[in-house]
């Protein structure tokens, strides 16, 4: 549920990689919405569908990214990604890198060419995700 205060983003390419950065950056990339009552999702242009923005080679794509508080275990946070890696023999993968406000980063690689849910768990002193990068990787 986005409103007039919805996030503005700058998506840019640098070499082989691409990045998504919110403007202003201190707001972070995730928003709480009615669709994600227990956490927050990345919303671009009033939509949680990221498949036109976060893409890679060989039909690699990210459809949605959400973040929740991790349940049990040693980690406090969990980022969930609905997406798929590139298709084709020796196609490699797509790597996502999430940067938080504390300066830490967390990597997640998508290798399967089937749409599936992927996750990365982490601890942080300031878990606001301020940048998402994605790259094609080789085998």
Image (cartoon, rainbow, N blue to C red):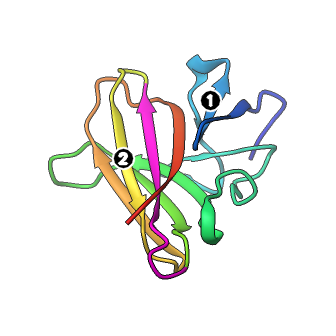
Residue 55 image position (x, y, % from top left) = 65, 57
Instruction: Please indicate whether residue 4 sits to the left or right of residue 67 in the image.
Output: right
Q: Is residue 66 visible?
A: yes
**Cα distance between the residues tagged 2 and 1:** 16 Å
Residue 18 found in image quarter? top right
Q: Secondary structure at mark 2?
A: strand
Residue drawn at (43%, 32%) of the image: 99
Q: Position of residue 107 (x, y in %)?
A: 36, 47
- Residue 130 lies left or right of residue 21; in this view the side is left
Q: Secondary structure at mark 1?
A: strand
Res 44 → quadrant: top right
Image height of 137 relative to 11, above or below: below
**Magenta span:** 88-100
Question: Which label belongs to residue 103?
Answer: none
Q: Residues within 10 Å of mark 1 (few under 14, many from 20)?
A: some
Q: Residues within 10 Å of mark 2 (few under 14, many from 20)?
A: some
Indicate yes or no whether the magenta region holds residue 29. no
Residue 37 picture location, percent across and down: 55, 52
Residue closer to the observer: 60 or 27: 60
At a point 59% along the width and 66% down the height, the residue shown is: 60
- Name which of mark 2 and mark 1 comes first in the sequence: 1
Query: Splitting the image into 4 quarters, where does residue 23 fall?
Result: top right
Is 96 part of what is drawn in magenta? yes
Residue occupying the point 52% across, 49% down: 135
Residue under pointer 1: 21
Left or right, 3 with respect to 68, comes to right
Residue 34 location (% of width, % of height): 66, 52
Quarter of the image where the C terminus is located: bottom left
Q: Residue at x 51, y 78 (%)?
A: 113
Instruction: Identify residue for label 2.
Output: 107
């Amino acid at each position: 549920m986005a409103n007039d205060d919805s996030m503005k983003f700058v998506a840019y390419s640098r070499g082989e990689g691409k990045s998504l950065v919110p403007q202003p950056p201190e707001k972070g990339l995730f928003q709480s919405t009615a669709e994600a009552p227990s956490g927050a999702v990345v919303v671009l242009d009033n939509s949680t569908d990221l498949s036109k923005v976060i893409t890679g080679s060989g039909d690699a794509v990210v459809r949605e990214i959400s973040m929740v508080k991790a349940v049990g275990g040693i980690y406090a946070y969990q980022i969930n990604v609905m997406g798929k890696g590139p298709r084709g023999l020796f196609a490699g993968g797509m790597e996502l890198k999430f940067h938080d406000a504390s300066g830490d980063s967390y990597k997640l690689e998508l290798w399967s060419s089937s749409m599936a849910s992927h996750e990365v768990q982490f601890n942080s002193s300031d878990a606001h995700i301020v940048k998402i990068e994605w790259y094609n990787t080789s085998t």
